[in-house]
Amino acid sequence: MKKFFIALFILAAVNLFAADLVNKDSVSYDISVEEYGTTHTSIGSSTTISGGAPNGSTITIKSTGSKIKVNGSSDVIIQNGSLSQ
């Protein structure tokens, strides 16, 4: 039981430092999020993914090649096909 609470605490602490991924464009994008492995996903137009940009991860928009290393918990913004924080 103690291990469960430790794991839950670690998971919650990691999510505290995850930034939101905000797409301000009117198009959807396929993206990859590299943290411990690579996760391939997509983000719809004018959409926010809560916690979609974990601190330390690298996010890439496949179609534009824009890439960013997430630093802290400030939102990561997609605008005009480019990533910024």
Image (spheres, rainbow, N blue to C red):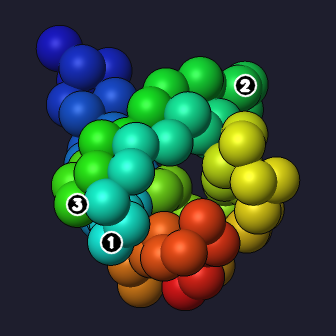
Among the 4 quarters of the image, the one containing residue 13: bottom left
Q: Secondary structure at mark 1?
A: loop
Relative depth, front residue between 16 and 68: 68
**Residue in the foreground of this view, choosing between 28 and 75:** 28
Label of residue 67 in the image: none
Crowdedness near tag 3: few (<14), some (14–19) or many (≥20) residues, C-alpha within 10 Å: some
Residues under numbered marks 2 and 1 in contact, where contact means CB atoms less than 8 Å apart: no
Q: Is residue 73 left or right of residue 55?
A: left
**Label 2 residue SS:** loop
Report helix, strand or loop for mark 3: loop
- Tags 3 and 1 touching, CB below 8 Å: yes
Q: Residue 56: in sight, yes or no?
A: yes
> Residue beneath label 2, please?
37
The span from disc 3 to disc 1 (Cα, nearest Å) is 5 Å
Q: Relative to 34, is 41 above or below?
A: above
Q: Position of residue 4 (x, y in %)?
A: 24, 20
Residue 46 tag number: 3
Identify the residue shown where x is 39% and y is 51%: 27
Please state if 41 lies on the left or on the right of 11 as rendered. right
Residue at the (40%, 43%) spot, across then down: 28
In this rendering, the answer to whether 22 lies above or below 45 is below
Provide the residue designation for mark 1.
24
Between disc 3 and disc 2, whose residue precedes?
2
